[in-house]
Image (cartoon, helix red, strand yellow):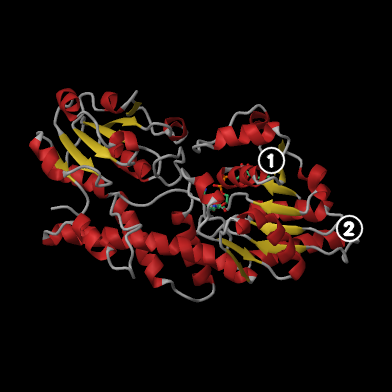
Amino acid sequence: MKIAIVGTGYVGLVTGTCFAEMGTEVFCVDIDKNKIEKLKQGIIPIFEPGLDEMVERNHKAGRLQFTTDLSSILNEVDIVFSAVGTPPDEDGSADLKYVLDVARTVGQNLNKYMVIVTKSTVPVGTAKLVKKTIQDELNKRGLSDLKFDVASNPEFLKEGAAITDFMQPDRVVVGVESEEAKRLMEKLYKPFTLNNYRIIYTDIPSAEMIKYAANAMLATRISFMNDIANMCEIVGADVNMVRKGIGADARIGSKFLYAGCGYGGSCFPKDVKALIHTANKLGYKMQILEAVENVNEFQKNILFDKLMKYYNNDIKGKTIAVWGLAFKPKTDDMREAPSLVLIDRIIKAGGKVRAYDPVAMEEAKKHHLGDSVIYAKDIYDATLDADAILMVTEWNEFRLPTWEVIKKTMKKPVVFDGRNIYNKEEMNEIGFDYFGIGIK
Ligand SMILES: NC(=O)c1ccc[n+]([C@@H]2O[C@H](COP(=O)([O-])OP(=O)(O)OC[C@H]3O[C@@H](n4cnc5c(N)ncnc54)[C@H](O)[C@@H]3O)[C@@H](O)[C@H]2O)c1
Protein backbone atom coordinates (compact mmCIF):
# COMPACT_ATOMS: atom_id res chain seq x y z
CA MET A 1 0.00 0.00 0.00
CA LYS A 2 1.25 3.48 -0.84
CA ILE A 3 0.14 6.67 0.83
CA ALA A 4 1.04 10.36 0.80
CA ILE A 5 1.03 12.59 3.85
CA VAL A 6 0.78 16.25 2.92
CA GLY A 7 2.20 18.57 5.58
CA THR A 8 5.34 17.32 7.29
CA GLY A 9 4.99 19.03 10.67
CA TYR A 10 4.55 17.51 14.12
CA VAL A 11 1.57 15.43 13.00
CA GLY A 12 2.50 14.69 9.38
CA LEU A 13 6.06 13.58 10.04
CA VAL A 14 5.07 11.35 12.95
CA THR A 15 2.12 9.88 11.02
CA GLY A 16 4.21 9.22 7.91
CA THR A 17 7.08 7.71 9.84
CA CYS A 18 4.84 5.47 11.94
CA PHE A 19 2.93 4.16 8.92
CA ALA A 20 6.29 3.49 7.22
CA GLU A 21 7.37 1.61 10.35
CA MET A 22 4.31 -0.62 9.83
CA GLY A 23 5.48 -1.45 6.29
CA THR A 24 3.46 1.06 4.28
CA GLU A 25 5.24 3.00 1.54
CA VAL A 26 4.96 6.67 2.45
CA PHE A 27 5.65 9.94 0.66
CA CYS A 28 5.89 12.86 3.08
CA VAL A 29 5.11 16.06 1.20
CA ASP A 30 5.68 19.65 2.27
CA ILE A 31 5.79 23.01 0.48
CA ASP A 32 8.67 24.04 2.74
CA LYS A 33 11.69 23.24 0.52
CA ASN A 34 14.15 23.79 3.32
CA LYS A 35 12.35 21.31 5.56
CA ILE A 36 12.23 18.62 2.87
CA GLU A 37 15.90 19.15 1.94
CA LYS A 38 16.90 18.75 5.59
CA LEU A 39 14.75 15.64 6.01
CA LYS A 40 16.41 14.09 2.96
CA GLN A 41 19.74 14.68 4.72
CA GLY A 42 18.45 13.11 7.92
CA ILE A 43 17.99 16.40 9.79
CA ILE A 44 14.70 16.38 11.73
CA PRO A 45 13.10 19.85 11.90
CA ILE A 46 11.28 19.27 15.22
CA PHE A 47 12.18 17.85 18.61
CA GLU A 48 10.22 14.68 19.28
CA PRO A 49 11.76 11.88 21.34
CA GLY A 50 12.66 8.80 19.25
CA LEU A 51 11.61 10.33 15.94
CA ASP A 52 15.05 10.91 14.37
CA GLU A 53 16.12 7.28 14.65
CA MET A 54 12.80 6.05 13.26
CA VAL A 55 12.87 8.50 10.32
CA GLU A 56 16.43 7.48 9.47
CA ARG A 57 15.67 3.76 9.57
CA ASN A 58 12.58 3.99 7.36
CA HIS A 59 14.15 6.48 4.97
CA LYS A 60 17.14 4.17 4.49
CA ALA A 61 14.81 1.22 3.91
CA GLY A 62 13.15 3.24 1.12
CA ARG A 63 9.71 3.14 2.74
CA LEU A 64 9.76 6.82 3.70
CA GLN A 65 10.41 9.40 1.01
CA PHE A 66 10.29 13.18 1.03
CA THR A 67 9.15 15.52 -1.70
CA THR A 68 7.85 19.04 -2.25
CA ASP A 69 5.84 18.03 -5.29
CA LEU A 70 2.50 16.38 -4.50
CA SER A 71 1.47 16.30 -8.16
CA SER A 72 4.46 14.13 -9.12
CA ILE A 73 3.52 11.26 -6.79
CA LEU A 74 -0.24 11.72 -6.36
CA ASN A 75 -1.39 9.05 -8.81
CA GLU A 76 0.97 6.45 -7.31
CA VAL A 77 -0.86 6.36 -3.99
CA ASP A 78 -4.07 4.82 -2.62
CA ILE A 79 -4.66 7.34 0.14
CA VAL A 80 -3.68 10.99 0.60
CA PHE A 81 -3.62 12.39 4.10
CA SER A 82 -3.82 16.11 4.63
CA ALA A 83 -1.94 17.01 7.81
CA VAL A 84 -1.31 20.68 7.12
CA GLY A 85 -1.71 23.42 9.72
CA THR A 86 -5.11 24.90 10.60
CA PRO A 87 -4.03 27.99 12.55
CA PRO A 88 -6.58 30.27 14.16
CA ASP A 89 -7.78 33.21 12.10
CA GLU A 90 -8.05 36.59 13.82
CA ASP A 91 -11.64 35.83 14.86
CA GLY A 92 -10.68 32.43 16.37
CA SER A 93 -12.04 30.35 13.50
CA ALA A 94 -9.82 27.65 11.98
CA ASP A 95 -8.04 28.94 8.89
CA LEU A 96 -8.69 26.30 6.21
CA LYS A 97 -6.47 27.93 3.60
CA TYR A 98 -3.82 25.17 3.66
CA VAL A 99 -6.37 22.34 3.77
CA LEU A 100 -8.15 23.75 0.71
CA ASP A 101 -4.82 24.40 -1.10
CA VAL A 102 -4.11 20.68 -0.77
CA ALA A 103 -7.63 19.80 -1.99
CA ARG A 104 -7.13 22.02 -5.06
CA THR A 105 -3.77 20.41 -5.89
CA VAL A 106 -5.39 16.98 -5.56
CA GLY A 107 -8.29 17.98 -7.84
CA GLN A 108 -5.90 19.46 -10.41
CA ASN A 109 -3.86 16.25 -10.65
CA LEU A 110 -6.06 13.29 -9.72
CA ASN A 111 -6.39 10.64 -12.44
CA LYS A 112 -7.67 7.60 -10.53
CA TYR A 113 -9.76 6.61 -7.49
CA MET A 114 -8.28 7.37 -4.10
CA VAL A 115 -9.33 8.43 -0.63
CA ILE A 116 -8.46 11.93 0.56
CA VAL A 117 -8.28 11.88 4.34
CA THR A 118 -8.18 14.95 6.55
CA LYS A 119 -5.92 14.41 9.55
CA SER A 120 -5.70 18.09 10.48
CA THR A 121 -8.13 19.31 13.13
CA VAL A 122 -10.93 20.92 11.13
CA PRO A 123 -14.45 22.18 11.89
CA VAL A 124 -17.41 19.98 11.14
CA GLY A 125 -18.29 20.35 7.49
CA THR A 126 -14.71 20.66 6.24
CA ALA A 127 -14.75 17.25 4.52
CA LYS A 128 -17.72 18.46 2.47
CA LEU A 129 -15.76 21.56 1.52
CA VAL A 130 -12.71 19.46 0.61
CA LYS A 131 -14.92 17.22 -1.53
CA LYS A 132 -16.48 20.19 -3.32
CA THR A 133 -13.07 21.80 -3.91
CA ILE A 134 -11.70 18.62 -5.49
CA GLN A 135 -14.88 18.08 -7.54
CA ASP A 136 -14.77 21.69 -8.84
CA GLU A 137 -11.21 21.14 -10.06
CA LEU A 138 -12.13 17.79 -11.68
CA ASN A 139 -15.09 19.45 -13.41
CA LYS A 140 -12.77 22.14 -14.80
CA ARG A 141 -10.64 19.33 -16.26
CA GLY A 142 -13.68 17.59 -17.77
CA LEU A 143 -13.30 14.67 -15.35
CA SER A 144 -16.55 15.12 -13.44
CA ASP A 145 -17.19 11.34 -13.35
CA LEU A 146 -13.84 10.44 -11.77
CA LYS A 147 -14.65 8.76 -8.48
CA PHE A 148 -12.93 9.64 -5.24
CA ASP A 149 -13.83 9.61 -1.54
CA VAL A 150 -13.12 11.87 1.38
CA ALA A 151 -12.65 10.69 4.96
CA SER A 152 -11.79 12.12 8.35
CA ASN A 153 -9.13 10.61 10.60
CA PRO A 154 -8.37 13.15 13.35
CA GLU A 155 -5.10 12.79 15.22
CA PHE A 156 -4.88 12.52 19.00
CA LEU A 157 -1.09 12.30 19.51
CA LYS A 158 0.58 14.43 22.15
CA GLU A 159 3.84 16.20 21.35
CA GLY A 160 6.58 14.68 23.49
CA ALA A 161 4.94 11.25 23.41
CA ALA A 162 3.84 11.32 19.79
CA ILE A 163 5.33 8.02 18.64
CA THR A 164 3.89 5.97 21.49
CA ASP A 165 0.55 7.73 21.12
CA PHE A 166 0.49 6.93 17.42
CA MET A 167 1.74 3.34 17.65
CA GLN A 168 -0.28 2.43 20.75
CA PRO A 169 -3.39 4.59 20.44
CA ASP A 170 -6.25 4.64 22.96
CA ARG A 171 -8.40 4.65 19.85
CA VAL A 172 -8.28 5.57 16.19
CA VAL A 173 -11.31 7.46 14.85
CA VAL A 174 -12.15 7.12 11.16
CA GLY A 175 -15.09 8.94 9.60
CA VAL A 176 -16.14 7.51 6.24
CA GLU A 177 -19.10 7.74 3.88
CA SER A 178 -18.46 4.82 1.52
CA GLU A 179 -17.68 1.11 1.88
CA GLU A 180 -14.76 1.44 -0.53
CA ALA A 181 -13.12 4.14 1.60
CA LYS A 182 -13.74 2.08 4.73
CA ARG A 183 -12.09 -0.99 3.15
CA LEU A 184 -8.98 1.01 2.27
CA MET A 185 -8.74 2.55 5.73
CA GLU A 186 -9.21 -0.89 7.30
CA LYS A 187 -6.34 -2.18 5.18
CA LEU A 188 -4.08 0.69 6.21
CA TYR A 189 -4.89 0.30 9.90
CA LYS A 190 -4.77 -3.53 9.84
CA PRO A 191 -1.49 -3.71 11.82
CA PHE A 192 -3.20 -1.72 14.57
CA THR A 193 -6.31 -3.91 14.54
CA LEU A 194 -4.08 -7.02 14.71
CA ASN A 195 -2.44 -5.52 17.79
CA ASN A 196 -5.90 -5.07 19.35
CA TYR A 197 -6.06 -1.29 19.15
CA ARG A 198 -9.56 0.09 18.82
CA ILE A 199 -10.61 1.60 15.51
CA ILE A 200 -13.91 3.45 15.76
CA TYR A 201 -15.71 4.01 12.45
CA THR A 202 -18.18 6.89 12.38
CA ASP A 203 -19.80 9.18 9.88
CA ILE A 204 -17.61 12.10 8.81
CA PRO A 205 -19.21 14.97 10.81
CA SER A 206 -19.01 12.88 14.00
CA ALA A 207 -15.31 12.14 13.42
CA GLU A 208 -14.64 15.85 12.89
CA MET A 209 -16.59 16.69 16.06
CA ILE A 210 -14.90 13.97 18.18
CA LYS A 211 -11.55 15.71 17.86
CA TYR A 212 -12.89 19.08 19.00
CA ALA A 213 -14.99 17.53 21.77
CA ALA A 214 -11.97 15.60 23.08
CA ASN A 215 -9.70 18.65 23.20
CA ALA A 216 -12.48 20.81 24.62
CA MET A 217 -13.09 18.25 27.38
CA LEU A 218 -9.38 18.11 28.28
CA ALA A 219 -9.09 21.91 28.30
CA THR A 220 -12.21 22.03 30.47
CA ARG A 221 -10.64 19.68 33.03
CA ILE A 222 -7.58 21.92 33.21
CA SER A 223 -9.52 25.16 33.61
CA PHE A 224 -11.89 23.49 36.07
CA MET A 225 -8.97 22.39 38.25
CA ASN A 226 -7.38 25.83 38.00
CA ASP A 227 -10.63 27.42 39.14
CA ILE A 228 -10.82 24.96 42.05
CA ALA A 229 -7.13 25.66 42.85
CA ASN A 230 -7.69 29.41 43.04
CA MET A 231 -10.64 28.81 45.33
CA CYS A 232 -8.51 26.42 47.45
CA GLU A 233 -6.10 29.30 48.10
CA ILE A 234 -8.94 31.51 49.28
CA VAL A 235 -10.47 28.95 51.64
CA GLY A 236 -7.18 27.46 52.86
CA ALA A 237 -7.44 24.06 51.14
CA ASP A 238 -4.69 22.25 49.20
CA VAL A 239 -5.50 21.46 45.57
CA ASN A 240 -3.16 18.46 45.54
CA MET A 241 -5.17 16.84 48.29
CA VAL A 242 -8.40 17.80 46.57
CA ARG A 243 -7.09 16.32 43.31
CA LYS A 244 -6.32 12.97 44.94
CA GLY A 245 -9.65 12.99 46.75
CA ILE A 246 -11.74 13.57 43.64
CA GLY A 247 -9.51 11.52 41.31
CA ALA A 248 -10.19 8.41 43.39
CA ASP A 249 -13.78 8.52 42.19
CA ALA A 250 -13.85 6.13 39.22
CA ARG A 251 -16.39 8.37 37.46
CA ILE A 252 -13.90 11.24 37.54
CA GLY A 253 -10.56 9.40 37.22
CA SER A 254 -7.17 10.70 38.29
CA LYS A 255 -5.74 11.85 34.96
CA PHE A 256 -5.59 15.45 33.77
CA LEU A 257 -6.50 16.97 37.13
CA TYR A 258 -3.39 19.06 37.68
CA ALA A 259 -3.66 22.74 38.50
CA GLY A 260 -1.05 25.00 36.93
CA CYS A 261 -0.28 28.24 35.16
CA GLY A 262 -2.53 27.63 32.18
CA TYR A 263 -2.64 25.46 29.09
CA GLY A 264 -0.96 26.42 25.82
CA GLY A 265 0.34 24.68 22.72
CA SER A 266 -0.85 24.39 19.19
CA CYS A 267 -4.08 22.55 19.96
CA PHE A 268 -6.12 23.34 23.09
CA PRO A 269 -6.24 27.14 22.73
CA LYS A 270 -6.96 27.07 19.02
CA ASP A 271 -9.44 24.20 19.09
CA VAL A 272 -11.44 25.65 21.99
CA LYS A 273 -11.58 28.99 20.16
CA ALA A 274 -12.56 27.33 16.88
CA LEU A 275 -15.39 25.38 18.48
CA ILE A 276 -16.74 28.50 20.18
CA HIS A 277 -16.51 30.32 16.85
CA THR A 278 -18.27 27.58 14.87
CA ALA A 279 -21.06 27.51 17.45
CA ASN A 280 -21.45 31.31 17.37
CA LYS A 281 -21.65 31.25 13.60
CA LEU A 282 -24.46 28.73 13.82
CA GLY A 283 -26.33 30.75 16.44
CA TYR A 284 -25.30 28.69 19.48
CA LYS A 285 -23.29 29.87 22.47
CA MET A 286 -20.87 27.37 24.05
CA GLN A 287 -21.05 28.83 27.53
CA ILE A 288 -18.80 26.31 29.27
CA LEU A 289 -16.04 26.70 26.70
CA GLU A 290 -16.16 30.48 26.92
CA ALA A 291 -15.55 30.12 30.66
CA VAL A 292 -12.77 27.58 30.00
CA GLU A 293 -11.00 30.16 27.84
CA ASN A 294 -11.49 32.99 30.34
CA VAL A 295 -10.11 30.91 33.21
CA ASN A 296 -7.10 29.99 31.10
CA GLU A 297 -6.33 33.61 30.21
CA PHE A 298 -6.55 34.47 33.92
CA GLN A 299 -4.33 31.52 34.83
CA LYS A 300 -1.56 32.42 32.37
CA ASN A 301 -1.10 35.60 34.41
CA ILE A 302 -1.23 34.01 37.83
CA LEU A 303 2.51 33.56 38.43
CA PHE A 304 3.09 37.16 37.42
CA ASP A 305 0.34 38.35 39.79
CA LYS A 306 1.84 36.34 42.66
CA LEU A 307 5.28 37.75 41.88
CA MET A 308 3.95 41.32 41.87
CA LYS A 309 2.12 40.79 45.13
CA TYR A 310 5.31 39.43 46.72
CA TYR A 311 7.28 42.51 45.62
CA ASN A 312 4.55 45.06 46.46
CA ASN A 313 3.82 45.69 42.79
CA ASP A 314 7.34 46.76 41.93
CA ILE A 315 9.77 44.47 40.07
CA LYS A 316 11.67 47.25 38.26
CA GLY A 317 15.28 46.18 37.78
CA LYS A 318 14.66 42.77 39.35
CA THR A 319 15.96 39.62 37.69
CA ILE A 320 13.47 36.81 37.32
CA ALA A 321 14.62 33.28 36.49
CA VAL A 322 12.13 31.51 34.21
CA TRP A 323 12.51 27.73 34.23
CA GLY A 324 10.91 26.20 31.17
CA LEU A 325 9.68 27.96 28.04
CA ALA A 326 7.96 25.28 25.92
CA PHE A 327 4.22 24.95 26.48
CA LYS A 328 4.89 21.54 28.04
CA PRO A 329 7.88 19.25 28.64
CA LYS A 330 9.52 17.09 25.96
CA THR A 331 8.75 19.48 23.12
CA ASP A 332 10.28 22.59 21.60
CA ASP A 333 6.83 23.90 20.66
CA MET A 334 6.38 27.50 21.84
CA ARG A 335 2.97 28.10 20.26
CA GLU A 336 0.69 29.85 22.81
CA ALA A 337 3.12 28.94 25.61
CA PRO A 338 2.18 30.53 28.97
CA SER A 339 5.87 31.52 29.32
CA LEU A 340 5.39 34.08 26.54
CA VAL A 341 2.64 35.90 28.44
CA LEU A 342 4.68 35.82 31.64
CA ILE A 343 7.90 37.10 30.11
CA ASP A 344 6.05 39.85 28.29
CA ARG A 345 4.46 41.04 31.54
CA ILE A 346 7.74 40.88 33.48
CA ILE A 347 9.50 42.99 30.86
CA LYS A 348 6.66 45.51 30.66
CA ALA A 349 6.81 45.85 34.44
CA GLY A 350 10.52 46.73 34.17
CA GLY A 351 11.96 43.36 35.17
CA LYS A 352 14.72 41.34 33.51
CA VAL A 353 14.49 37.65 32.64
CA ARG A 354 17.06 34.86 32.74
CA ALA A 355 15.34 32.00 30.93
CA TYR A 356 16.28 28.38 30.49
CA ASP A 357 14.64 25.51 28.64
CA PRO A 358 16.37 22.24 27.69
CA VAL A 359 15.20 22.32 24.06
CA ALA A 360 12.88 25.26 23.30
CA MET A 361 15.31 28.21 23.48
CA GLU A 362 15.88 28.41 19.71
CA GLU A 363 12.12 28.41 19.13
CA ALA A 364 11.67 30.99 21.91
CA LYS A 365 14.22 33.30 20.26
CA LYS A 366 11.99 33.42 17.17
CA HIS A 367 9.42 35.25 19.32
CA HIS A 368 11.85 38.19 19.70
CA LEU A 369 11.26 38.71 23.38
CA GLY A 370 13.73 41.59 23.56
CA ASP A 371 17.05 42.53 25.12
CA SER A 372 15.75 42.13 28.67
CA VAL A 373 15.74 38.35 28.18
CA ILE A 374 18.97 36.44 28.63
CA TYR A 375 19.03 32.77 27.62
CA ALA A 376 20.91 30.85 30.30
CA LYS A 377 23.15 27.79 29.98
CA ASP A 378 21.24 25.72 32.52
CA ILE A 379 18.89 26.13 35.47
CA TYR A 380 21.73 27.18 37.75
CA ASP A 381 22.94 29.82 35.35
CA ALA A 382 19.35 31.09 35.09
CA THR A 383 19.21 31.78 38.83
CA LEU A 384 22.35 33.96 38.92
CA ASP A 385 21.51 37.09 40.95
CA ALA A 386 17.83 36.27 40.55
CA ASP A 387 15.16 37.82 42.75
CA ALA A 388 12.75 34.95 42.08
CA ILE A 389 12.35 31.68 40.19
CA LEU A 390 9.22 31.06 38.13
CA MET A 391 8.81 27.35 37.37
CA VAL A 392 6.77 27.27 34.17
CA THR A 393 7.39 23.95 32.37
CA GLU A 394 7.84 20.79 34.41
CA TRP A 395 10.80 19.21 32.60
CA ASN A 396 12.16 16.22 34.54
CA GLU A 397 15.52 17.90 34.98
CA PHE A 398 13.83 20.68 37.03
CA ARG A 399 12.39 18.27 39.57
CA LEU A 400 15.37 17.77 41.88
CA PRO A 401 17.73 20.74 41.61
CA THR A 402 20.46 21.29 44.18
CA TRP A 403 18.70 24.06 46.07
CA GLU A 404 21.71 24.79 48.31
CA VAL A 405 23.73 25.87 45.26
CA ILE A 406 20.83 27.86 43.85
CA LYS A 407 20.20 29.64 47.15
CA LYS A 408 23.77 30.93 47.18
CA THR A 409 23.53 32.38 43.67
CA MET A 410 20.15 34.09 44.12
CA LYS A 411 19.56 37.54 45.55
CA LYS A 412 16.36 36.39 47.20
CA PRO A 413 15.40 32.71 47.55
CA VAL A 414 11.80 32.56 46.41
CA VAL A 415 10.09 30.11 44.07
CA PHE A 416 6.76 30.52 42.28
CA ASP A 417 5.90 27.02 41.16
CA GLY A 418 3.50 27.09 38.23
CA ARG A 419 3.26 23.30 38.06
CA ASN A 420 3.22 22.34 41.74
CA ILE A 421 6.26 20.08 41.44
CA TYR A 422 7.97 21.12 44.68
CA ASN A 423 6.91 20.68 48.28
CA LYS A 424 6.16 23.81 50.26
CA GLU A 425 7.33 22.47 53.64
CA GLU A 426 10.59 21.17 52.17
CA MET A 427 11.22 24.46 50.39
CA ASN A 428 10.50 26.51 53.52
CA GLU A 429 12.80 24.25 55.55
CA ILE A 430 15.76 24.97 53.25
CA GLY A 431 15.06 28.68 53.43
CA PHE A 432 13.01 29.38 50.32
CA ASP A 433 9.75 31.28 50.23
CA TYR A 434 7.45 29.09 48.16
CA PHE A 435 4.20 29.72 46.31
CA GLY A 436 2.41 27.02 44.33
CA ILE A 437 -0.99 27.03 42.63
CA GLY A 438 -3.89 26.25 44.92
CA ILE A 439 -1.69 25.64 47.92
CA LYS A 440 -2.10 27.56 51.21
N1 LIG B 1 0.77 19.33 17.01
C1 LIG B 1 -0.04 18.53 17.65
O1 LIG B 1 0.21 18.10 18.77
C2 LIG B 1 -1.33 18.09 17.01
C3 LIG B 1 -2.03 17.01 17.53
C4 LIG B 1 -3.22 16.61 16.92
C5 LIG B 1 -3.70 17.30 15.82
N2 LIG B 1 -3.02 18.39 15.35
C6 LIG B 1 -3.55 19.07 14.16
O2 LIG B 1 -2.82 18.60 13.04
C7 LIG B 1 -2.65 19.67 12.09
C8 LIG B 1 -1.17 19.89 11.81
O3 LIG B 1 -0.56 20.33 13.00
P1 LIG B 1 1.03 20.40 13.17
O4 LIG B 1 1.29 20.78 14.56
O5 LIG B 1 1.63 19.16 12.59
O6 LIG B 1 1.34 21.63 12.18
P2 LIG B 1 2.78 22.15 11.69
O7 LIG B 1 2.63 23.60 11.55
O8 LIG B 1 3.86 21.58 12.54
O9 LIG B 1 2.94 21.48 10.24
C9 LIG B 1 2.15 21.82 9.13
C10 LIG B 1 3.00 21.63 7.88
O10 LIG B 1 2.16 21.76 6.74
C11 LIG B 1 2.94 22.35 5.70
N3 LIG B 1 2.06 22.85 4.64
C12 LIG B 1 1.23 23.92 4.65
N4 LIG B 1 0.57 24.00 3.46
C13 LIG B 1 0.99 22.98 2.70
C14 LIG B 1 0.66 22.53 1.40
N5 LIG B 1 -0.23 23.16 0.62
N6 LIG B 1 1.30 21.43 0.93
C15 LIG B 1 2.21 20.78 1.69
N7 LIG B 1 2.55 21.16 2.93
C16 LIG B 1 1.94 22.24 3.45
C17 LIG B 1 3.74 23.42 6.42
O11 LIG B 1 4.86 23.81 5.68
C18 LIG B 1 4.11 22.67 7.72
O12 LIG B 1 5.36 22.01 7.59
C19 LIG B 1 -3.38 20.88 12.70
O13 LIG B 1 -4.69 20.91 12.22
C20 LIG B 1 -3.37 20.56 14.18
O14 LIG B 1 -4.45 21.17 14.84
C21 LIG B 1 -1.84 18.79 15.91
Ligand 1 closer than 8 Å to label 2 CB: no
Residue 312 seen in render: no
Q: Which residue of the protein is positioned furthest toward the right in this rendering? A: 142
Q: Which mark is residue 31?
A: 1
**Which badge, 1 or 2, comes first in the chain's sequence?**
1
The residue singled out by tag 2 in the image is 141
Q: Quadrant of residue 28?
A: top right
Q: Is residue 191 left or right of residue 252?
A: right
- Seen from the viewer's position, the closer of residues 351 and 62 is 62
Q: Position of residue 17 (x, y in %)?
A: 63, 42
Q: Helix, strand, or loop for circle 2?
A: loop
**Residue found at x 28% / y 58%:** 226
Label 1: few (<14), some or many (≥20) within 10 Å?
A: some
- Seen from the viewer's position, the closer of residues 281 and 7 is 7
Label 2: few (<14), some or many (≥20) within 10 Å?
A: few
For the residues marked 1 and 2, what is the alpha-carbon distance in whole angstroms? 24 Å
**Residue found at x 58% / y 55%:** 195
Ligand 1 closer than 8 Å to label 1 CB: yes
Q: Quadrant of residue 310?
A: top left
Q: Position of residue 42 (x, y in %)?
A: 63, 28
Position above or below: 240 against 285: above
**What amino acid is labelled 1 in the image?**
Ile
Q: Is residue 347 left or right of residue 5?
A: left
Position above or below: 278 against 268: below
Q: Position of residue 69 (x, y in %)?
A: 76, 40
**Residue found at x 22% / y 58%:** 229
Q: Which mark is residue 265?
A: none
